[in-house]
Image (spheres, rainbow, N blue to C red):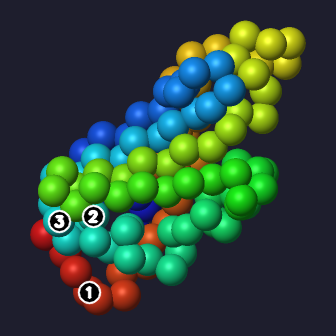
Amino acid sequence: MQIGEMAKLIRSKNAGPFSMTIDILFEHESYYDRVKNSPDFNVDTIANVYKLNSADIDIYTCDPILAIKISFNRPVISGDIGDTDVFGGQQHGPIVDMEIPDRNNASY
């Protein structure tokens, strides 16, 4: 199942001119746990999707609100020549389509 099918909200935005953040919010704990605990969701897979160095990516989880935050340095500074998304609002797309296999047969 794709993350976009499990999440209630996925958004991206700038975290200053040099950094980007992607928020993934879930309504159902089973989906949150599935993504959070998946070996297919980690800094290496995110780095591969965004063509970044895995050392530059941080993933944070917040269990009480069923949220995951991904932060990384922007490859191009916001507003600089070559920047295609000044506000970073369109960078969550690859996460929406990311497949997370169901290893526990969890469903809602």
Where is mark 3, residue-wise?
29
Where is mark 1, residue-wise?
105
User: Label 1 sits on what residue type?
Assistant: Asn
Q: Quadrant of residue 82?
A: top right
Q: Residues within 10 Å of mark 1 (few under 14, many from 20)?
A: few
Q: Earlier in the sequence, mark 3 or mark 1?
A: 3
In x, y percent, where is residue 94?
A: 58, 47
- Helix, strand or loop at label 2? It is helix
- The residue furthest right is 81
In the depicted structure, whether residue 102 falls above or below residue 92: below
Q: Residues within 10 Å of mark 2 (few under 14, many from 20)?
A: many
Which quadrant is the C terminus positioned in? bottom left
- What distance separates the C-alpha of mark 2 from that of mark 1? 14 Å
Where is mark 2, residue-wise?
32
Residue 4 visible in the picture: no
Q: Residue at x 18, y 51 (%)?
A: 65
Residue 35 visible in the picture: yes
User: Label 2 sits on what residue type?
Assistant: Tyr
Residues under numbered marks 2 and 1 in contact, where contact means CB atoms less than 8 Å apart? no
Q: Quadrant of residue 10?
A: top left
Q: Residues within 10 Å of mark 3 (few under 14, many from 20)?
A: some
- What distance separates the C-alpha of mark 3 from that of mark 1? 14 Å
**For the residues carrying marks 2 and 1, which lies nearer the camera in this image?**
2
**For the residues carrying marks 3 and 1, which lies nearer the camera in this image?**
3
Q: Residue at x 51, y 68 (%)?
A: 41
Q: Residue at x 73, y 10 (%)?
A: 79
Q: Earlier in the sequence, mark 2 or mark 1?
A: 2
Residues under numbered marks 3 and 2 in contact, where contact means CB atoms less than 8 Å apart? yes
In x, y percent, where is residue 46?
A: 62, 58
- The residue furthest bottom is 104
